[in-house]
Image (spheres, coloured by chain):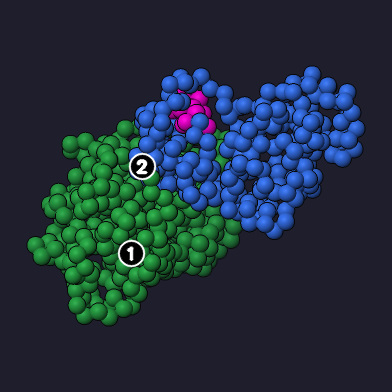
Chain colours: A blue, B green
Amino acid sequence: MRWITLTTLLSLGFATQVTAEAGGNAERGEDLFRQCAGCHQVGESAEHRIGPSLNGIFDRSAGVAEGFRYSNAMERTAAGGLVWTYESLDTFIENPRNLVSGTRMSFRGIANQQDRDDLLAYLRLFSASPANIPEAAPTAKGLDHDLDPEILSISGDPAYGEYLSNECTTCHLLSGNDNGIPSITNWPVEDFVIALHAYKNAKRLHPVMQMMAGRLSNEEIAALAAYFKGLDQ
Amino acid sequence: MKLNRRKFIGTTAAASALLAAPMAIGSGHGRAKVVVIGGGAGGATAARYIAKDSNGEIDVTLVEPTRTYYTCFFSNLYIGGFREIDSIAHSYGTLASEYGVNVVHDWAIGVDRDAKSVTLAGGSTLSYDKLILSPGIDFVDGAVPGWDLNSQNAMPHAYKAGSQTELLKAQIEAMPEGGTFAMVAPPNPFRCPPGPYERVSMVAHRLRDINPTAKIIVADPKEKFSKMALFQEGWADNYSGMIDWIGADFGGGNVEVDPHAMTVSIDGEVTSVDACNVIPAMKAGRIAELAGVTDGNWAPVNANDMSSKMDENVYVLGDATSQGDMPKSGFSANSQAKVCANSVRGALTGSSVFPARYSNTCWSLIDTDNGVKVGATYEATEEKIAKVDGFISATGESADLRAATYRESVGWYDGITADMFG
């Protein structure tokens, strides 16, 4: 989304509401959202990726986005009646695991209150009602890539992926729990393949992951993606 | 794809019942039998993976003397005050109840490779089709003059985690103000190459809090050690003036201790110490020697599947092996165990055997939120496990990166212990 679209929204009268409720700067929030965009999309045609689409998140019950597979931890918390209000979202974004211990959301949180206000002001723009979702491309940082479509289209063998996953599970928990090492369970195949190739090609910087991905073939990456996508929790 | 195969066996005989059984255990079932000796990073992982992936076709027995296993990795963090001892304690309950592993809490005291059987201290024998030895390390007799196992209460090694670690921590915390802690570091090769130096860091961290004028002396028979530049930078930055590391060049290998007088002699100079951690030279855990699969101090193995070079029906994992380039670490043992498990299943059930691939990463903590790491990938060649690629943390890294590295190590601990114990 660009500032122009935000301006359009402001002209439609959402700004008053946003400012009044949140005291946040939605424009700044859009910048802050970049750190979320690896996993979450928002906007028109936003889809569930590693995390659920965040359209209409305000005043929605937790854990109900259709077609998204939540962690057991999130489902448990949702069953306890969690609703995404400004306050609960604020608490969650401050430190996801304080609110939902065991969530697969691999995010340390945002300590700064103003940053959270700004981010929520931005997200609020996509929540007034479904009709008000602005016409903007979904955020797609996690999907930015120049990967050969042929590599992306390889169909992986999950049985081989299961064997290869032995190398992943020394650090990554199959349960999807995350405490310092991100969850890789139930990712969309495409995101998984793109991420591993980004490490393999040294576009993502983590040295352990660069080393691990460095010797995985295209077929092996596809196999791993297929295995982790199909995991039961 | 087969998912959720974990509960293929509903029950397993209780360990106590197994101990009471006078006859050979596991005989007469017709299922292939695997006996695993040693329930650490190698043995527990191998037992779990074989049981998990064999759909009940393989009868897996794990022999481990202790009911509560304390991981050596992260035991230094307990000494430093970053972990409680309970947080590094694990039981074998899940391996038994969810994976159907027969867990036998006893000592293996003999292996008859012709009869393919293992004798336990309790008197029973276990027959096997494939035997996996993952016994960890023992100490070389006489490696440090003046010290033997009878001295381990006065001068703990704390290199098998548990009561020894608790003892060492208590002794360090009881040092008089301005007292001296000495470590006698081991010669290569030894378990956990960064381990002694992470320990020095953790001791310094603890003493800086409770006894800031205390001194730390390290007598080291080596001229260099794992992550040396990182540790020395960290010691200078965080524990300035506390740590005196005496390497081989300055007589660090010429050491004698007196556990009664509590003195350490380094290159002829005798120093009184208030706490002393003696980490002697190491060799394969004794059962490997008793099984006749060692050559010198270690058990040589084939790089493609971790099978012993002495016996195709015996596999050896982890610290006890000589295999090539991998360090003796829990991560390595876990990695080797999964290659071994794949091969053992293939041999016994005809399941697919994939090419070996190994990896290792060792994290160390220098000070609060100051973690570093070193790691590599490995492949099997004709003569050894050979390094393919690797990395190491750099000196001068940002505080954010060091904090992230530490958090990562905490996540890894959860990951590997889940991979070992279910």
Instruction: Return the residue nearer the eye: B420 or B287.
Output: B420
Q: Chain of mark 1?
A: B
Which residue is at 21% across, 68% downward? B29
Residue B236: x %, y % from top left: 52, 42
The relative height of residue B108 versus residue B343 in the rendered view (above or below) is below
The relative height of residue A93 versus residue B255 in the rendered view (above or below) is above
Instruction: Return the residue nearer the eye: B129 or B327.
Output: B129
The relative height of residue A168 versus residue A126 in the rendered view (above or below) is below
Instruction: Return the residue nearer the eye: B378 or A194.
Output: A194
Mark 1, secondary structure of its residue: loop
Residue A88: x %, y % from top left: 76, 49
Tag 1: residue type?
Answer: Val
Tag 2: residue type?
Answer: Ala
| Residue range (magenta) | A191-208
Distance between mark 2 and mark 1 Cα atoms: 23 Å
**Residue at numbered disc 2:** A159
Tell me the tag on residue B101.
1
Residue A39: x %, y % from top left: 61, 35
